[in-house]
Image (cartoon, rainbow, N blue to C red):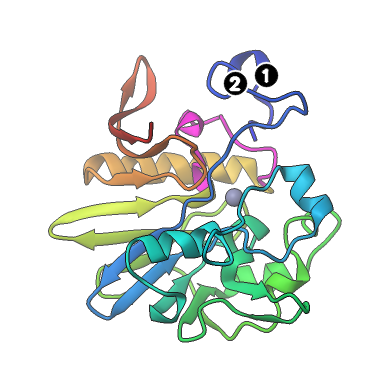
Amino acid sequence: MFGVVPKVLWERRATADERNRITLALRCLLVEHDDGLVLIDTGLGNKENEKFRDIYGVDNAGQGGRTKLEDALREVGYTPDEVKWVINTHLHFDHAGGDTYTDAGGKISLAFPKARYVVQKGELDFARNTNERTAGSYLPHNVQGIPFQLIDGETEILPGIRGIPTPGHVPYHQSVLVTSGGEQACFVADLVPTSAHLPLPWIMGYDVQPLVTLETRRRLYQRAAAEDWLLVFEHDPTVVSGRLGKDGKGVGLVDAVALH
Ligand SMILES: [Zn+2]
């Protein structure tokens, strides 16, 4: 998760278990929009097998629903049928795996049957044409059978909800900027997966274009600081969100909202 950053440095920010794994969240963002519910990313879903769940230490089974995401929707009073839009930042298994689900018989169906699914056009092409380096993250059952609505570049998907290209992790990765009541929140997804990844060169080994990630971050940070955006972190196990601040000479976080 920390690429070329030495473990002696990153383990001050994230504790590894005996198999060298760190705890990560699969935090999706639900927006209560005038047009209906908008769900940004869908987590891992329930389609992966026992071996996969063991490798990644997946803890995503629902109590009442199929996944923890469906449980969380129910907790705030909604059902999957009420989600009108699903926006995927990209199609890696930990972001789009929950677009669909499998039943006990192995049949795969849309997890949000009444929703329109939105993704960048370039991302769908990239996900469907894998190579040896990218195939491990783009699983065929996450890129087939979903009636995606494609957008191309920066797009206002709905009033106040913009897809913003933030390439680097993958070439057509997008972040989602939500504007409401004069404030802006940006769901940065894998551009900055956790608050520990805020320093410009703390880039994941998973990123296929690490130097592009660096420049995308530099640009996004300038805009985020100038417009006082709230940044929302998809994979941070404790820090949900915060605003950019200074940490010595580097980038830090202020107004952090953390779970206990
Ligand atoms: Zn991810």
Residue 47 seen in render: yes
Q: Which residues lie in the magenta part?
A: 191-207
- Residue 135 in magenta stretch: no
Instruction: Residue at 52% x, 64% y: name it.
Output: 64
Kind of element beneath mark 2: helix
Residue 73 position (above or below residue 202): below
| Amino acid at pointer 1 | Pro
Instruction: Residue at 67% x, 59% y: name it.
Output: 93
Instruction: Residue at 67% x, 19% y: name it.
Output: 6
User: Residue 97: x percent and y percent?
Assistant: 64, 64
Mark 2 — residue?
A: 10
Q: Is residue 167 left or right of residue 156?
A: right
Proximity of marks 2 and 1: CB atoms separated by less than 8 Å: yes
Kind of element beneath mark 1: loop
How many numbered marks does the figure carry?
2
| Amino acid at pointer 2 | Trp
The quadrant of the picture occupied by the C terminus is top left
Q: Is residue 190 left or right of residue 154?
A: right
Which residue in the rendered view is the most extreme toward the front? 64
Residue 115: mark = none
Q: Residues within 10 Å of mark 1 (few under 14, many from 20)?
A: few
Any atom of ligand 1 within 8 Å of the CB at mark 2?
no
Q: Is residue 226 left or right of residue 208?
A: left
Instruction: Residue at 36% x, 26% y: name it.
Output: 252
**Viewer-side residue, 116 vs 191:** 116
Q: Mostly what secondary structure, the magenta segment?
A: loop
Q: Quadrant of residue 29?
A: bottom left
Mark 2 to mark 1: distance in Å? Answer: 7 Å
**Viewer-side residue, 206 vs 107:** 107
Mark 1 — residue?
A: 6
User: Residue 242: x percent and y percent?
Assistant: 31, 37
Q: Nearer the viewer, mark 2 or mark 1?
A: 2
